[in-house]
Image (spheres, rainbow, N blue to C red):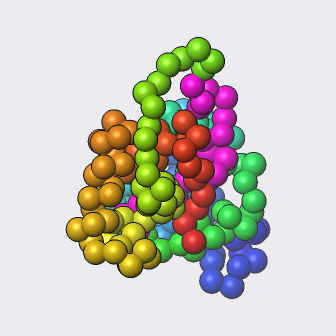
C-alpha cells in the first residue's frame, strides 16, 4: 500500500515464499525485490541468491527484524543491494527503493545496532588508529560510495581516494569495503545509514 501511494513506484506482485517469488519473476519482471529473511521453507538470504541467479539485474533489498553483522555479511555474499530493518522509518525504505544502483550496499543504521554486534565485555581487540580524514572517508564508504564517488564528493583524486580506502581496509583487517564498514560499525567507529 505504501509503495502504491508513491507516484513513481508500483507494487507488481506479492509472494509469501521464495518459490512463489521465483515463479512471479518472469511474469512481473520487477526492478527491485524486497525480501524478508525469515520465510517458510527457503530463507530470504538463499532466496536472494536464487533471485539474482534468475535475474541478475534485479536489486534485492533485505528487510527483516533479524539483523546484525552476520545477516549483513550473508546478504552481501548473496548479492543483496541493501539491508533494512523493520524498525526503520517507512521513508527510509521508500528512499532505498528509489535509490539508483551503485557499487555499494545500502545498510540501515539499525541493521548493525543489534545484540552481539559490539564486542563482548572483556574481549580484546586491536586499537584502530584511523586519522580524521580516514574516518571521513569511512563515513562515505558506509553510505555505499565507491572510490570514484568518494573522490568526487571530497575533491581529491581517484588515486588518493583509493589509497585512503586501501589503508582503511588494511587497518581494519578487511578484504572488502563492506567488511571494513561492518567492522568499523561493530567497533563504534562509524554509523551506517542508507545512501542519500
Q: Is residue 159 visible?
A: yes
Residue displayed at 36% across by 65% down: 146
Residue 187 spot, x, y in % from top left:
54, 36
> Image check: 121 left or right of 132?
right
Q: Main secondary structure of the magenta part?
A: loop
Q: Residue furthest bottom?
A: 7
Q: Does the magenta segment cover residue 46? A: no
Query: Along the line of sight, which residue is nearer the eye, 126 or 10?
Result: 126
Magenta extent: 102-119
Quadrant of residue 91 within the rendered picture: bottom right
> Image check: 159 left or right of 77?
left
> Image check: 12 left or right of 52?
right
Residue 124 spot, x, y in % from top left:
50, 19
Q: Residue furthest top?
A: 122
Q: Quadrant of the N terminus?
A: bottom right
Residue displayed at 43% across by 47% down: 130
Amino acid at each position: 500500500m505504501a509503495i502504491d501511494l508513491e507516484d513513481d513506484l508500483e507494487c507488481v506482485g506479492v509472494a509469501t515464499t521464495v518459490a512463489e517469488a521465483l515463479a512471479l519473476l518472469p511474469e512481473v519482471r520487477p526492478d527491485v525485490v524486497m525480501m524478508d529473511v525469515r520465510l517458510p521453507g527457503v530463507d530470504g538470504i538463499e532466496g536472494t541468491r536464487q533471485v539474482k541467479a534468475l535475474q541478475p539485474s534485479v536489486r534485492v533489498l533485505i528487510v527483516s527484524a533479524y539483523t546484525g553483522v552476520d545477516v549483513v555479511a550473508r546478504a552481501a555474499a548473496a548479492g543483496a543491494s541493501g539491508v533494512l530493518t523493520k524498525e526503520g522509518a517507512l521513508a527510509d525504505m521508500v528512499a532505498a527503493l528509489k535509490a539508483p544502483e551503485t557499487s555499494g550496499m545500502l545498510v540501515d543504521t539499525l541493521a548493525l545496532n543489534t545484540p552481539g554486534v559490539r564486542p563482548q565485555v572483556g574481549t580484546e581487540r586491536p586499537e584502530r588508529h584511523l586519522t580524521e580524514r580516514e574516518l571521513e572517508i569511512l563515513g562515505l564508504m558506509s553510505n555505499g560510495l565507491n572510490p570514484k564517488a568518494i573522490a568526487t564528493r571530497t575533491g581529491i583524486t581517484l588515486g588518493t581516494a583509493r589509497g585512503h580506502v586501501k589503508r582503511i581496509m588494511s587497518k581494519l583487517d578487511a578484504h572488502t569495503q563492506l567488511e571494513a564498514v561492518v567492522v568499523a560499525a561493530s567497533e563504534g567507529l562509524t554509523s551506517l545509514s542508507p545512501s542519500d
